[in-house]
Image (cartoon, rainbow, N blue to C red):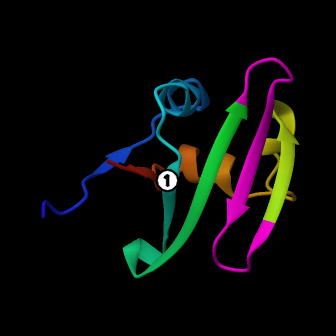
Amino acid sequence: MEKPKLILIKSLIHLVRMIEEGHTNYTIMLAGGLIRSSKKIRYDSKTHKFRIFNSIDDTEQILTVKEVLNPKLTNIGKAITLQALYMYT
């Protein structure tokens, strides 16, 4: 069995494009990759909302595009900026 590859998510538009192609498994590399925060992310193009399942604490969030970029609500926007959000293939 082939080992999963990690692909860097470079922008919010890139994230949406990957989700639209069917990719839902993502990870944020914390502390230089020593810690990972795994997430399942879906995007609804009709409502323009993200549905995020956080594996670390089994919580789910439904956020707008603006809210996804708000570091008080999620670390996804900051992870994109810091080049720390990756998609599993």
Q: Residue furthest left?
A: 1
- Residue 85 position within the rendered picture, expressed as x and y whole percent measured from the top left: 49, 52
Residue at the spot 74% in from the left edge and 20% down from the top edge: 45
Q: Helix or strand or loop: what does disc 1 sit on? A: strand
Residue that appears at 55% across and 45% down: 80
Q: Is residue 2 left or right of residue 43?
A: left
Residue furthest front in the image: 1
Residue 35 part of the magenta-drawn span: no
Report the side of 11 relative to 76 (left or right).
Answer: left
**Callout 1, which amino acid?**
Asn
Over which residues does the magenta segment extend? Answer: 44-59
Q: Is residue 56 above or below residue 59?
A: below
Q: Is residue 65 above or below residue 23?
A: above
Question: In the picture shown, does residue 81 fall above or below 30?
Answer: above
Name the image quarter holding residue 13.
top right
Choose between 1 and 80: the one closer to the eye.
1
Quarter of the figure that contains the N terminus: bottom left
Residue neighbourhood size for the residue with mark 1, other residues' Cα within 10 Å, grouped as few (<14), some (14–19), many (≥20): some
Q: What's the residue at 59%, 28% (across, down)? A: 16
Residue 3 figure quarter: bottom left
Where 73 falls versus 81 (above or below)?
A: below
Asked whether 70 or 49 is in front, the reply is 49
Q: Nearer the viewer, residue 25 or 67?
A: 25
Q: Horizontal and vertical percent for residue 21?
A: 46, 26
Q: Residue at x 47, y 56 (%)?
A: 84
Q: Which residue is mark 1?
A: 25
